[in-house]
Amino acid sequence: MTRTTIELTTTAEDHRIAQLAAAAIGLSLIDAAIPLPLPGVKPGLANIVTLIVLARYGWVAAAWVSGLRVVAGGLLLGQFLSPGFFMSLTGALLSLLVLGLAVRLPRRWFGPVSWSILAAFAHIGGQLLLARLWLIPHNGLFYLVPLFSVAALAFGIINGLIAARLLAELKDAESLAAR
């Protein structure tokens, strides 16, 4: 009997993405533990990591971090392949598509805060669309749009401000280290 060995070689980029995904997964778990009055309304703390990765390493790295977060979060929370998992996946995919476009906008006027707001609206929009098409096939669902929009705006601003602050601190730390 012959044995076949599969050897995977990893790069520094792989390690960085794994570490950032672990941070995003941890924040997702914290998110899940925060009691909120309405199902589906969450702060989206893991999106802070996604925004930082987008700004520092680009869209592809942000997509990896976000995808790993959704899959691992689903597994850890016992929601893998459940409706909640697909809601999260749909929201993440739509927000990544919007971020892919938003990152191309002039950085003079657009940055982490505006990206975060756009991503939050895309995320909740994707979730509402999936809920309407799959889980709640009734237009009454759209009565919740104003409530979800306020939450998306509020959490989008807060997460964007946190990401912008952390990015500024990282930049300052790097400039001090370069001296």
Image (cartoon, rainbow, N blue to C red):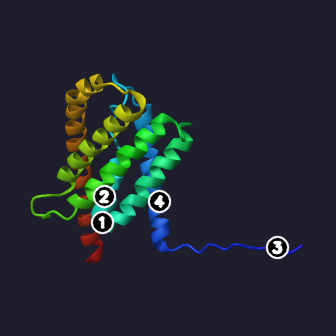
Q: Quadrant of the C terminus?
A: bottom left
- Among the two numbered marks 4 and 2 on one chain, the one whose residue lies closer to the N terminus: 4
Spatial CA span between label 4 and label 1: 14 Å
What kind of residue is marked 4?
A: Gln
Mark 4 and 2 residues: CB-CB less than 8 Å, in contact?
no
The residue to which callout 1 is attached is 56
- Among the two numbered marks 3 and 1 on one chain, the one whose residue lies closer to the N terminus: 3
What kind of residue is marked 2?
A: Ile
Select label 3 or label 2 by which is in front: 3
Residue 25 x %, y %: 46, 48
Q: Quadrant of the N terminus?
A: bottom right
Spatial CA span between label 3 and label 1: 42 Å
Tell me: residue 35, above or below residue 118: above
Residue 170 x %, y %: 28, 62
Q: Quadrant of residue 156?
A: top left
Mark 1 and 2 residues: CB-CB less than 8 Å, in contact?
yes
Mark 3 and 4 residues: CB-CB less than 8 Å, in contact?
no
Spatial CA span between label 3 and label 4: 32 Å
Mark 3 and 1 residues: CB-CB less than 8 Å, in contact?
no
Mark 3 and 2 residues: CB-CB less than 8 Å, in contact?
no
The residue to which callout 2 is attached is 52
Spatial CA span between label 3 and label 2: 43 Å
For disc 4, the neighbor class at 10 Å (few under 14, some 14 to 19, many from 20) is few
The residue to which callout 3 is attached is 3
The residue to which callout 4 is attached is 19
What kind of residue is marked 3?
A: Arg
- Among the two numbered marks 4 and 1 on one chain, the one whose residue lies closer to the N terminus: 4
Select label 3 or label 1 by which is in front: 3
The residue at the point 45 percent across, 41 percent down is 86
Q: Is residue 30 left or right of residue 44?
A: right
Tell me: residue 22, above or below residue 133: below
Spatial CA span between label 1 and label 2: 6 Å
